[in-house]
């Protein structure tokens, strides 16, 4: 899923989801082909350069771009600039398990919440199954050794450990609940961090070639 936000000065922000169907708002729905035509339509009111951000939280899209498959980008005839950030994207999306990144992984089984709290007294009980995680009985942050185990097949978790991100922000969460289908009184589930990709697109709306030596973003 791509969310696109126009950042041209004075323009109203537009959020667009692209993939299969594209929703601009509740009244309009566009196909991917129509969206590409919309984003690349030449209008006299457009500036010479149109700058847009494409934001994706779909891991398959990020893998496709890292593999230089640009069909997922809702822009006609895109050219990809490969820089050090692109190299990092390739490293973060490289996994031995294939394309799909499962954000949930099962842990150990327990007989009850009481037994779990004896093993992990730091775990927090979700009172009345309310708050941010109403489907869990308990939640806790994984220990470093557990994160190390998770990182063996998850490059993103590995990168967070290598750069010590886990020391300031939770790298994962462990929740417990009864798994009725399996007949397990209490089972652990590791919830991994999701990843967002932000891509800058620059469209030349003029009739002449423009050479960009560098792009300067005053926000950084």
Image: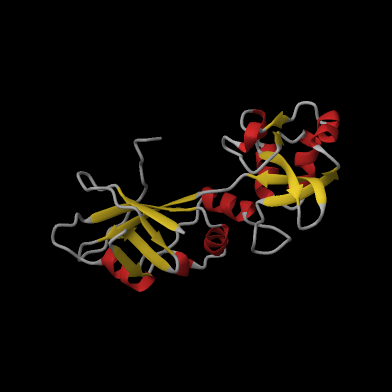
Q: Residue at x 69, y 64 (%)?
A: 98
| Residue 196 vertical placement versus 66 (above, below) | above
Q: Quadrant of residue 20?
A: bottom left
- Colour logic: secondary structure
Quarter holding the C terminus is top left
Residue 214 placement (x, y as % from top left): 37, 47
Residue at left offset 76%, top offset 51%: 179
Residue 104 is situated, as x and y percent measured from the top left of the image, at: 68, 51
Q: Quick check: 187 left or right of 21? A: right
Please provide percent x and percent y for residue 67: 57, 64
- Residue 210's x, y, as percent? 27, 58
* Residue toward you, 144 or 185: 185
Residue placed at 72% from the left, 45% from the top? Answer: 190
**Residue shown at 21%/56% (left/top)?**
48
Q: In the orientation shown, which residue stands out farthest toward the top? A: 122
Front-lying residue, 129 or 96: 129
Is 116 positioned to the left or the right of 58 in the image? Answer: right
Decide: is 117 above or below 172. above
Query: Residue 202's image quarter?
Result: bottom left
């Amino acid at each position: 899923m791509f969310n696109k936000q126009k950042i041209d000065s004075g323009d109203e922000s537009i959020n667009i989801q692209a993939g299969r169907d594209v929703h601009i708002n509740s009244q309009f729905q566009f196909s991917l082909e129509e969206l590409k035509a919309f984003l690349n339509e030449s209008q006299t009111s457009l500036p010479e350069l149109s700058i847009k951000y494409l934001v994706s939280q779909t891991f398959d899209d990020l893998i496709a771009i890292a593999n230089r498959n640009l069909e997922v980008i809702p822009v006609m005839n895109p050219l990809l600039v490969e820089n050090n950030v692109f190299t990092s994207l390739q490293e973060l999306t490289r996994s031995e398990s294939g394309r799909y990144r499962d954000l949930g992984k099962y842990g150990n089984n327990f007989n009850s919440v009481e037994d779990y709290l004896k093993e992990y007294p730091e775990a927090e009980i979700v009172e009345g199954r309310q708050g941010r995680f109403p489907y869990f009985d308990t939640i806790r942050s994984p220990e470093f050794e557990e994160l190390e185990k998770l990182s063996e097949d998850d490059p993103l978790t590995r990168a967070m450990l290598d750069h010590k991100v886990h020391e300031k922000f939770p790298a994962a969460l462990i929740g417990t609940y009864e798994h009725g289908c399996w007949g397990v009184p209490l089972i652990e589930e590791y919830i991994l961090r999701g990843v967002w990709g932000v891509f800058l697109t620059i469209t030349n709306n003029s009739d002449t070639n423009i050479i960009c030596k560098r792009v300067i973003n005053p926000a950084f």
